Structure formats: C-alpha cells, structure tokens
Image: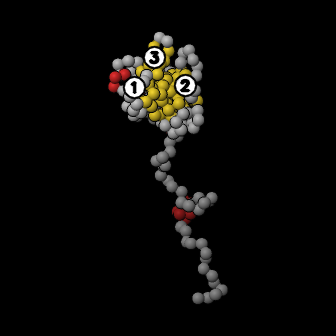
Amino acid sequence: MNPDILPDPSPMVSAEEDNLLSSDDETPASTAPDPLYSQYLDEEDSAWVYQNLRSGHPENIPTNAIPSSPSKSNQLLTPRSSSGSLTCPCCFTLLTMDSQRHEKWGTQFRSILVMNVFVDFSVPLSHTSKGFLKIEGEVNAMEPPKKLNEIECWYKTQCARCGTGVAWLEYGEEVYHFYDCLESS
C-alpha cells in the first residue's frame, strides 16, 4: 500500500442515500408518516374529554379531526356541571375528579366517584334535627355496623396517603361530602 495515498475517511455514499441524509444529524430521514403523530390530535383529545368527562348543558364542539363516522362529526357535546377536581389540603393527593359545590357553603363539595380515600367506619355519626351525634357501638374500621344501616349514618373519610380528615360519607346515599379541600378546575 502506498503511504502517499490515504483512503477516504468518509464511507462511500450513493446519490440516493445522500438525498435521504439530513444535513443536521446525518441520519436517514424517514419517508413513512409517523404513526404517533396527527395534526388533529389536540382537537381529537378535546372532543374526547367533552364526550367522556362532561355532561349537563349542550355545547357544540366543532373539530377538524377526520371523523370515525359521519354521525360523530360536529355532534352536540355537553359540559359537566362540575366544580372541578379536589385534592387533599395537606399532601395534594387527588381525591375526586368530579364534584359539585354546596349551594350554601362555598368550601364544601359533594361527590360520588372518589379515589385515594379511606372511610373510617369506627367513627359513625347520626344526623338528627339538633345536628350530628356520635353513635357508640361496635368498633370495626373496615365495615359499617349492621344495626346502623337503616338510619342515616355518616362516616369519617380520610386521605389514604396522609390521614387528613377530608370528607364525611353519607352511607345511605353513598355520597361523600368534602370540606376544606383544594379545588382545581
């Protein structure tokens, strides 16, 4: 081998491959469309939220997305009459994503679908005309006392992560009444 003639350090690249190489990173550019990208993703996501997470008053949500069926394009979608989601005031754990604000007391909310809470069945309260009274009886934190099921009972509900009291469960109606929680819309 002649020492005066050095091999070319760049590999041999054909004209076709040279056209496919990007000038920035020297990697081949793909000609196939990205299966995880769509120019309509934001509109599709917004329509999905309105369709699945909202209810109440009709609202027309026009989208530029390609409809999956002709009946779904520009359909009348309804927003929920929700006050928003609630989080624990101490550890900010999400407690419910759908709540309704109390008509009289603005810091209280009610919800049926909850998460990250623990109902303490060892602390039952009974609602009377004079207010709430603590009921003495069997103490089992995992299930409600059987003899109290026919009267209106409320049970203390805590954040499952930090143990802060965040709500009362109205056992007969299966409604959680939240107080002093952080609201976000």
Along the viewing direction, whichever of 135 and 88 lies nearer the viewer: 135
Mark 2 vs mark 1, foreground winner is 1
Cβ atoms under marks 2 and 1 closer than 8 Å: no
How far apart marks 1 and 3 lie (CA) works out to 16 Å
**Which tag, 1 or 3, sits closer to the chain's start?**
3
Q: Nearer the viewer, residue 176 or 48?
A: 176
Quadrant hosting residue 123: top left
Q: In this view, does 43 lie to the left or right of 71?
A: right
Q: Residue at x 36, y 27 (%)?
A: 145
Q: Is residue 99 left or right of residue 23?
A: left
Instruction: Indicate the secondary structure of the residue bearing disc 1.
Output: loop
| Residue 166 location (% of width, % of height) | 53, 29
Q: Name the residue under label 2.
A: 179
**What's under tag 1, amino acid-wise?**
Gly
Q: Where is residue 60 in the image (x, y as percent from the top left)?
A: 49, 23
State the image coordinates of residue 48 (x, y, percent, origin top left). Answer: 46, 32
Regarding residue 70, the answer to whether it shows in the image is no
Q: Is residue 175 above or below residue 25?
A: above
Q: Estimate how packed mark 1 is, as few (under 14), some (14 to 19) or many (20 or more) residues with alpha carbons within 10 Å.
A: few
Q: Which amino acid does label 3 sit on?
A: His
Checking the image for residue 137, the label placed there is: 1
Which numbered disc, 1 or 3, marks the residue closer to the eye?
1
Q: Specify whether 9 is left or right of 139.
A: right
Q: Quadrant of residue 136?
A: top left
For disc 2, the neighbor class at 10 Å (few under 14, some 14 to 19, many from 20) is many
